[in-house]
Amino acid sequence: MPYSRRVVVTGVGLVTPLGVGVELNWQRLLAGHSGVRRVEALSGLPSQLAATVPVGDAEGDFAADRCPLLGPGDATSTSTFIQYALNASHEAMQGGGWAPSTSCERERTGVAIGSGIGSLRDIVEAAEIMRVRGHRRISPHFVPKMLVNMAAGQVSIRAGLQGPAASPSTACATGVHALADALRIIRAGEADVMLAGGAEACIEPLSIAGFSRMRALSTSFNEAPSSASRPFDARRDGFVMGEGAAVLVLETEE
């Protein structure tokens, strides 16, 4: 029966506040590094902290022009959470040694990558452009940049994968929801290999303001960012917003 199929993890890809890549993340985790930082753009808000992905030229920094699944100019037509998903997916496929080359392999490889919010930043920027300059100045890339399902869609397109595509959006449970969807798809016999995970990039004043109004975010550690995330501590006072992507390659044991 299909539901008796054993499914294993053969590849992992990471873009996190500790940097890009599984090996670097593991080293920094063992060294006790924190990815939580005070963010200048959040000045004046009750919570001014976030776990942001480092961007730049230093070791482990993320740069869209170094993402193998993005070509010249693509960085402007895809949003940040999609770029994170593309980078993590490429690393996961490389780690799993999976590069489907035949039509059958491509058709039997699917993607289940979700996002809780998608690109809130693009929505905020487009709303301001429309208010100031009118609807004709809205980018034709606006809709495909902000849709939650476009992380899975762009990974499928750019990696040439033609199997099932899923993009759950269930808030903080999104990543594990995507893994469960991928597992069920493989066990149902609809695919042999699935890229599965989640991607998020919504560190932006509007999202922080919204969660602050819910009194959900940590506000007591703005001067000590690395001490803010303490979910099981008596002095906990809320969570810290984060961003990044994690993607696994799941495949049948056989």
Image: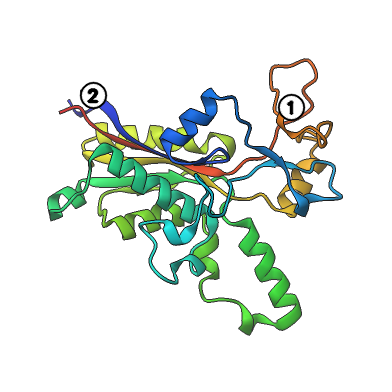
219 relative to 75 in the view: left or right: right
Q: Would residue 197 be seen by someone viewing this image from the given angle?
A: yes
132 relative to 68 in the view: left or right: right
The residue carrying pointer 2 sits among few (fewer than 14), some (14 to 19) or many (20 or more) residues within 10 Å by Cα, namely few
Compare marks 1 and 2 and give the one earlier in the sequence: 2
Write down the residue under mark 1. 227
Residue for point 42% across, 57% down: 66
Q: How many marks?
A: 2
Vertical position of residue 134 compared to residue 50: above or below: below
Residue for point 16% across, 48% down: 105
Q: Would residue 149 be seen by someone viewing this image from the given angle?
A: no
Write down the residue under mark 2. 6
The residue nearer to you, when weighing 133 against 50, is 50
Q: Position of residue 79 (x, y in %)?
A: 53, 60
Q: Position of residue 120 (x, y in %)?
A: 63, 56
User: Element at badge 2?
Assistant: loop
Q: Quadrant of the C terminus?
A: top left
Q: Position of residue 157 (x, y in %)?
A: 32, 60
Residue for point 50% across, 44% down: 60
- Residue at the limit of the structure toward the front, as seen here: 58
The residue nearer to you, when weighing 64 against 140, is 64
User: Element at badge 1?
Assistant: helix
Question: Amino acid under label 2?
Answer: Arg
The residue nearer to you, when weighing 61 against 108, is 61
163 relative to 149 in the view: left or right: left
Vertical position of residue 139 compared to residue 94: above or below: below
Tag on residue 219? none
